[in-house]
């Protein structure tokens, strides 16, 4: 997938990508090397629990969120992450901590980025510069897409051990916005996510052998309590927010 709207429509594009991710976890299990990296490199203690380090959860490019426009959704997602943490801890007693949390104020979905922590060392992540921010701002003002609305439904656990809220574009405005920014700032084409997910955290331990199906079933049940329609009126970047002017689709 290339992040562009296809004949199947934006909702179907996301659903196909999430289905692939879910099947990958079921068939391949969890990646021990990725879990180990999350525990050793991508997490740190904070307030009596583990949190995901900024390099792996703070936006460095163009994103929606930080924070979510609905604080109630953020609180619910945090509680669901706590439940998944509790399930994993119960399956693996004594292996605490089992989960590293993304702080709720940092919940976001990335539209475009120069670099990504999974593809680069933490010290080679390049945040958006002020000059590029100005280029993005001009592109957004010219596009006049208006606010972006996402439907958020469900939770999945990926092969790499990340807990994600699955989001779906309400229409093709997000794709038009992303394509327009990428055309104006070609360097931001380096990392274009296939989906519009929101990461809640990283697993830090592998569940015991034979218990993955139980964990995935619990995550799916928790996902039944994710139902939010979020409308974003601005893009978030490290250099400041960019208002999404124009009429909503």
Image (cartoon, helix red, strand yellow):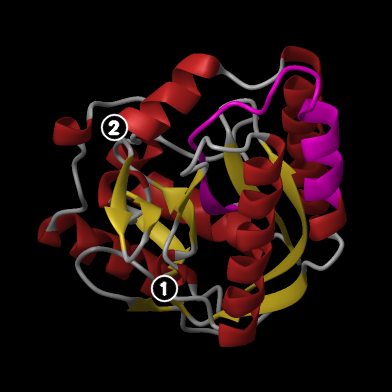
Relative depth, front residue between 134 and 67: 67
The quarter of the image holding the N terminus is: top right
Above or below 160: residue 89: below
Query: How far is mark 2 from mark 1, CA to CA?
Result: 22 Å
Residue 37 falls left or right of residue 104: left
Total of numbered circles in the picture? 2
Q: Nearer the viewer, mark 2 or mark 1?
A: 2
Residue 174: image location, x then y, percent: 60, 60
The residue carrying mark 1 is 105
Above or below 175: residue 205: above
In the displayed orientation, state which residue is furthest to the front: 94
Q: What SS does tag 1 mark?
A: helix
Residue 158: name its quadrant.
Answer: top right
Relative depth, front residue between 218 and 167: 218
Q: Residues within 10 Å of mark 2 (few under 14, many from 20)?
A: some
Whether residue 60 is visible here, answered yes or no, is no
The residue carrying mark 2 is 41
Residue 31 falls left or right of residue 151: left
Task: State which tag comes first along the sequence, 2 or 1.
Answer: 2
The region drawn magenta spans 198-220
Q: Residue at x 28, y 26 (%)?
A: 120
Relative depth, front residue between 247 and 156: 156
Q: Residue at x 81, y 19 (%)?
A: 210
Residue 173: image location, x then y, percent: 64, 64
Tell me, yes or no, whether the highlighted magenta stretch contains residue 202: yes
Q: Residue at x 59, y 78 (%)?
A: 75
Above or below 238: residue 39: above
Q: Residues within 10 Å of mark 1 (few under 14, many from 20)?
A: some
Residue 166: image location, x then y, percent: 71, 53
Q: Report if the CB atoms under discs 2 and 1 are less than 8 Å apart.
A: no
Relative depth, front residue between 57 and 36: 36
Tell me, yes or no, whether the highlighted magenta stretch contains residue 235: no
């Amino acid at each position: 997938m290339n992040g562009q709207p296809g004949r199947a429509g934006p909702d179907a594009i996301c659903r196909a990508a999430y289905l692939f991710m879910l099947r990958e976890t079921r068939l391949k299990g969890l990646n021990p090397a990725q879990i180990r990296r999350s525990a050793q490199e991508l997490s740190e203690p904070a307030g009596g629990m583990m949190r995901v380090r900024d390099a792996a959860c703070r936006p460095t490019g163009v994103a929606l969120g930080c924070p979510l426009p609905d604080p109630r959704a953020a609180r619910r997602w945090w509680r669901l992450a706590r439940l998944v943490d509790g399930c994993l801890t119960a399956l693996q007693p004594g292996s605490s901590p089992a989960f590293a949390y993304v702080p709720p104020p940092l919940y976001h979905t990335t539209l475009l980025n120069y670099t990504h922590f999974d593809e680069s060392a933490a010290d080679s992540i390049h945040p958006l510069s002020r000059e590029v921010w100005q280029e993005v701002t001009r592109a957004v003002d010219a596009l006049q897409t208006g606010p972006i609305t996402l439907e958020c439904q469900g939770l999945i656990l990926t092969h790499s051990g990340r807990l994600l809220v699955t989001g779906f574009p309400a229409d093709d405005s997000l794709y038009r916005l992303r394509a327009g920014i990428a055309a104006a700032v070609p360097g931001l084409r380096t990392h274009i996510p296939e989906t519009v997910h929101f990461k809640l955290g990283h697993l830090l331990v592998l569940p015991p052998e034979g218990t993955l199906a139980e964990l995935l079933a619990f995550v799916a049940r928790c996902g039944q309590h994710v139902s939010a329609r979020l409308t974003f009126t601005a893009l978030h970047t490290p250099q400041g927010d960019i208002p999404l002017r124009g009429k909503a689709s």
